[in-house]
Image (tube, helix red, strand yellow):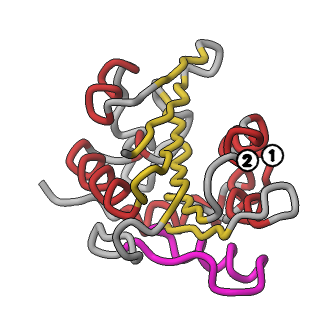
């Protein structure tokens, strides 16, 4: 089937939804802070996949983490917001399903509340790209919603295109550990890239 126009979907959403434009609306920001000690223990280079307006990139670059952090996204609006707020080129486009960085580049790869927004083939393609750009001896840290979203895109499709169980996601990624928050119906997962 035809790939959804993720760029158009998320340009509109980041433009229109206030929640996407403040760090308190960012689950990734919350999870990064909650796991600060653990994230600090990894090497300096970090990529946030699906960075939106860039709050995780900004946080990881701050004095709290001091990482060499970058972001990638399908949304021009998100990339523009990130780069204008941070005052430089820190966020880049995912184009033709490719992350624009070389192989084995990052010590930490994060992906917060992104994967469930994709169709299954696109999830598998993004997984391959995340593994490609991760260094040997790096970590992948993800948050994945396990329920339908409260909103729809301009086609009327639920924003969470793939709603599956934690076991299903684990079968795709082979995580080293994960936990499920039943209140929010979301899973948080870690994978060590060997």
Q: Where is residue 78 shown, x and y percent of the image?
A: 60, 70
Give residue 24's mark: 1
Q: Look at 47% across and 44% down and name the residue there.
A: 152
- Whether label 2 touches label 1, CB < 8 Å: yes
Q: Is residue 16 left or right of residue 157?
A: right
Give the image location of residue 163, x and y in percent. Answer: 37, 28
Q: Is residue 4 above or below residue 93?
A: above
**Mark 2 burial class by Cα count in 10 Å: few <14, some 14-19, many 20+:** many
Alpha carbon distance from label 2 to label 1: 7 Å
For disc 2, the marked residue is 29
In the picture, the quarter occupied by the C terminus is top left
Residue 33 sits above or below residue 67 on the image: above
- Farthest residue to the left: give it: 1
- Callout 1 secondary element: helix
Q: Report the front residue among 158 and 54.
A: 54
Q: Residue at x 48, y 45 (%)?
A: 140
Residue range in magenta is 73-94
> Is residue 67 found left or right of 121 in the rendered image?
right
Q: At which x and y percent is residue 142?
A: 51, 40
Q: Quadrant of the N terminus?
A: bottom left
Q: Is residue 83 above or below residue 24?
A: below
Residue 21 placement (x, y as % from top left) = 74, 59
């Amino acid at each position: 089937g035809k790939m959804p126009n993720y760029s158009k979907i998320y340009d509109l959403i980041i433009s229109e939804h206030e929640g996407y434009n403040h760090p308190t609306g960012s689950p990734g920001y919350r999870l990064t802070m909650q796991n600060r000690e653990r994230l600090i223990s990894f090497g300096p280079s970090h990529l946030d996949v699906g960075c939106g307006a860039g709050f995780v990139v900004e946080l990881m670059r701050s004095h709290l983490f001091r990482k060499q952090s970058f972001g990638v996204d399908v949304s021009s609006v998100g990339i523009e917001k990130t780069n204008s707020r941070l005052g430089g080129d820190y966020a880049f486009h995912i184009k033709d399903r490719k992350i624009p960085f070389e192989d084995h580049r990052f010590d930490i790869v994060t992906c917060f509340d992104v994967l469930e927004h994709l169709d299954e083939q696109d999830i598998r393609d993004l997984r391959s790209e995340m593994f490609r750009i991760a260094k040997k001896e790096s970590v992948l840290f993800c948050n994945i919603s396990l329920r339908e979203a409260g909103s729809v895109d301009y086609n009327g499709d639920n924003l969470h295109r793939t709603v599956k169980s934690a076991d299903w996601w684990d079968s795709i990624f082979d995580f080293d550990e994960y936990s499920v928050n039943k209140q929010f119906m979301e899973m948080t997962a870690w994978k060590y890239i060997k």
